[in-house]
Amino acid sequence: MKKLRMTHQREIILQELKKMSRHPSADELYERVKKKLPRISLATVYRNLEILSAAGMIRKIEISGRLKRFDWETEPHNHISCIRCHRVDNIELKRRLTRTLKPADNRGYKISGCRIEFTGYCPACRVTVTKKGGKKMGCKKCNTGLSDKQTLVLKALAKSKDPSGSKDIAAASGLEPKQVSCQITALKKKGFVSSPVRCKYEITQEGKKALS
Amino acid sequence: MKKLRMTHQREIILQELKKMSRHPSADELYERVKKKLPRISLATVYRNLEILSAAGMIRKIEISGRLKRFDWETEPHNHISCIRCHRVDNIELKRRLTRTLKPADNRGYKISGCRIEFTGYCPACRVTVTKKGGKKMGCKKCNTGLSDKQTLVLKALAKSKDPSGSKDIAAASGLEPKQVSCQITALKKKGFVSSPVRCKYEITQEGKKALS
DNA sequence: ATTCTTGCAAAGCGTTTGCATTGTT
DNA sequence: AACAATGCAAACGCTTTGCAAGAAT
């Protein structure tokens, strides 16, 4: 574990965050901090927010990841999502939990809705996690789908012993470079590909299993 | 209001979405749809998901927008967010709402947490919305901050009668082009700048007010 | 015939990262 | 002296958009 240093920038970032009663986005905080440290860069703010929240000094509010998800069912209902593979399911709550707050609690808002989201390990991830505490294990049920292009990319990676760049992968798989990065993303999400170095990718153990 | 056409692509997208019990991201759905329509493009999927959810035929699950937000308070607590200006506040719930589901309800998940998020109009937006049903009105309390750079950009826009590209803005404001796009984004978020055409920006009525 | 939709490629936007330099410990 | 942190610019990854061609009404 790295030792944290209290730099001036970090101090100001913490200070400003502490002052704000609302929860700022990185950019909002950046605008504030810049008034005190005009030369600070946005990257520093991002980095510090990550570092500080990893250290437990602040908290990241991140609901459902950042991908939009879509649902056939248009009636409002609640969800449960997996903190590992990010799958999202519906849940039904027996008693309709209060959809409105008491006036004393609503902070002056005019409430229009309430979302309740449980989080945890989905049935598939639950198994793999409890079995081996494995944070990098594949998640069988969640990762079954493997498109043709993904298979091509995975095969290309399986052939090379060293991490490959996306151009090499494109050449080896016969796909367009544009398409490759898209597949890489999907495969990383599934845990079949890792990126030991920036822009270099290699197949994981799980990836090999998935191919066979 | 435009009339929707039921194209083959749209039909398949709906069909596949309907089949899925989980809530797919655009990309996941795209992978599925591509098996039936190999020539479909990801953009079409994105477009249709937006169109269909705007039409109320499907539902977009989008919690707290996509920006990460940060919080000084590390203890878990619940939030209320404005559906108009996206500000986020803490709320305290008198009775701790059930943090765990009955086994019958948990869909096989191992629950680790529960987030409750109320949504509605914040005190400031509440006023403007009820006063004029105005969907484009500025939101005084939420939009107060105006950084130096933002002011420069806004002034530059105020001088030109026609929508300007970011290069023109950079020239007129004396800022780096890189910095301009960043400010534009912030200003758009605040409702001070609109983009009538792609890559062209103009100051809004609210923007003018904010300057004065 | 009109106008909505598509596929493609390119751009947008928030976020992250490589790298040389600076600053803390 | 060792190495964490910074500023900068470039890259990422998901999403949106301009455009010309195609399809639905």
Image (cartoon, coloured by chain):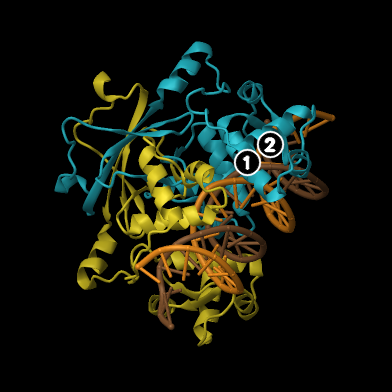
Chain colours: A yellow, B cyan, C orange, D brown
Please state if B170 lies on the left or on the right of B20 as rendered. Answer: right
**Sequence-earlier tag: 1 or 2:** 2
- Between B4 and B162, the one nearer to me in the picture: B162
Which residue is under mark 2?
B153
Query: Outermost residue, top direction?
Result: B131
How far is mark 1 from mark 2, CA to CA? 7 Å
Q: Residue at x 46, y 67 (%)?
A: A188
In the displayed structure, C8 sits above or below D25; it is below
Which residue is under mark 1?
B183
Quadrant where the C terminus of chain A sits is bottom left
In the displayed structure, B1 sits above or below B10; it is above
Q: Residue at x 55, y 39 (%)?
A: B50
Q: Residue at x 53, y 42 (%)?
A: A35
Q: Residue at x 47, y 37 (%)?
A: B58
The picture quadrant where one finds residue B135 is top right
* Image position, residue B49 (x, y; %): 54, 42
Three-letter residue code for mark 1: Gln
